[in-house]
Image (spheres, rainbow, N blue to C red):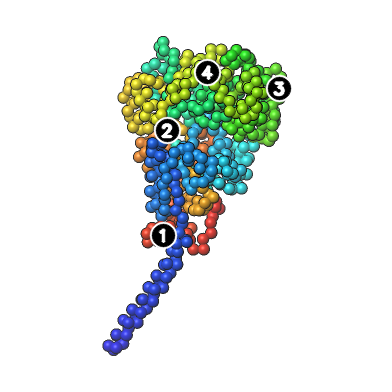
Amino acid sequence: MKRRNLLLPIALACLLLTTAGLSTKATAATFDEKDKVPGFNFWITSQTYDPVRYEIGLMVAKKWEKLGFDIEITALEWATMSSKGMKGHEHDVFMIQWGGKPERVDPMHWLYTLHHSNESRSGGYNVAGYQNAAYDRIVEGFVKSVNLDERQKNAFKAQEILSRDVPQPPLIHRIITHAYNSRDFTNPTYAMGEGLNSFWNWLSITPKGERKSAKFGYVTDIKLLNPLSTKTGADIYMLRMIYDSLIRMDAEGKPVPWAAESYKYLDETTIRVVLKEGMTFHDGKAVTVEDVKYTFDLILSVKSPYYASKVKKLKSVAITGKNELTFTLSEPYAPFISNGFGTVCILPKHIWQKKYETAGKDGILKWDNSKPVGSGPFKFEYWRPNEEMKLTRFASHFRPPKIEEFIRIPYAKAYGVVQGLQAGEIDAAGWSLLPLERQTLSSFKHLTINTIDDQGYYMLHYNMRKKPFNDVRVRRALTYAIPKKMIVELIFSGQAVPAYSTVAAVNKFWHNPGVEKIGDDFKKAKDILKQAGFRWDDKGKLFYPQNYSVQTITK
């Protein structure tokens, strides 16, 4: 009995040792280093360039690390991020703030330009490299149909797919917060997505007293005055005040006739435009259909960087009457109204043709156009780089502004803009105030602060050309882990709203409120990975499933 009792513990010990050895080997095999989900580099802007994006980036990275990913954070200046990420597609993941320009109310930019497979080429705006044939067909239908109900239906479907596949998930919509000098001015216009940056604001804002000059503060100066060669938003905001376009997007984001008296589809690819009579350029020359035709022909000829994508479906422009033109498209392209008619500056043929004949295609794009002549509600007076730019009221315009002068003053940093508002150096600012800035300015009695929702947003660009972002389950898990509501409260002090669709809720006609709302659920993020077979080692690091097979889009 005693012998047998001695042998039994020895046998059990041997069995345990053997089992432990097998367990150790199995564990080592299970968590082979080659199966580890690769870490990645998260690019965020420097704290000095944009403290908001910087803080959002740190908050998101912490959640991703908790989920089991190895994250390296790199703070970059915007010029580098734009070159390497937006154009070169060299990134793993980075964050950008997309502006809500008026022409983006028609969600062509959000749905097609940022996500169609054709745009995933080098330099294209599909920065993620998203490839989904089913999505392409839906968004092509959205672009080509001129039936508004059909376009809306396709836009809703496209948003549903993007919300599931999360190639480039939106994070936060700001609540744009702008201040103006209400002691000296009244009747401002806060436009959707732009606030006081709106073209309509500078037509409506009205002096209360003798001072007729309004000063506008902005972070950084403009760069170019040539509508054919610039691509920066600050330049375009100024140029649209100097030049007229055939239509304008109104404060609610609807296209309304402007230099055009009317426009009408004759069929899916033919649009008739009647030009408003009696318009003149700032030098006194009449605006004619010849000027309009010449402008669009010139843009096609020189392949203007800003306009090329907006008029790419334009086949020809013909003068078909005294004040009538017919635009023919190569195929149906519904966004041509907002993106073509709504953005193209009507150029005076008598000035640009002469310059083109002497300088040629390259020369016309490099021309500084230092004294721009348009037909818009404001005339150009001067531009002193890094000091100020002055426009004056064009009294002969069919919709002249209420102010006599518009002076744009650039500041190196946002702090200078805030100080300028406090001191009365400027009357309004093109800077959305941060919570602390708003709190500071609210005590100044000469200022009024108002808000409007932004249709632009902060967006993440995953690079689906690289692991682990080529797997939709990883993208969904990463996106579910993002604490959007916490970001709104802690970073924006409530002056923002979580974003779930690529089309903002403020853009009511085009926004699909029924999309999957991904974010703010860390447990869901972990469950997605568990259900897909992903594993964690004892250090909490993430490993691929055994017999792993990548899933690029939702099934």
Q: Nearer the viewer, residue 59 or 383?
A: 383
**189 with respect to 131 (left or right):** left
Identify the mark nearer the N-term, 2 or 1. Answer: 2
Q: Mark 2 — residue?
A: 175
Secondary structure category for the residue under label 1: strand
Q: Mark 3 — residue?
A: 319
Identify the mark nearer the N-term, 4 or 1. Answer: 4
Q: Say if residue 260 shows up in the picture.
A: no
Q: Mark 4 — residue?
A: 380
Secondary structure category for the residue under label 2: strand
Residue in the picture at 62% in, 41% down:
140
Residue in the picture at 41% in, 27% down:
411
Q: Amino acid at mark 3?
A: Ile
Nearer the viewer's eye, disc 4 or disc 1?
A: 4
Nearer the viewer's eye, disc 3 or disc 2?
A: 3
Q: Residue 547's x, y, as percent?
A: 51, 63
Q: Amino acid at mark 2?
A: Ile
Q: Amino acid at mark 4?
A: Phe
How dense is the environment of label 2, judged by Cα within 10 Å: few (below 14), some, or many (20 and up)?
many
Identify the mark nearer the N-term, 1 or 3. Answer: 3
Q: Amino acid at mark 1?
A: Trp
Nearer the viewer's eye, disc 2 or disc 1?
A: 1
Identify the mark nearer the N-term, 3 or 4. Answer: 3
The answer to whether 283 is drawn above or below residue 123 in the figure is: above
Residue in the picture at 54% in, 31% down:
231
List the single residue furthest toward the left.
2
Picture quarter with the N terminus: bottom left
Identify the mark nearer the N-term, 4 or 2. Answer: 2
Q: Mark 1 — residue?
A: 536
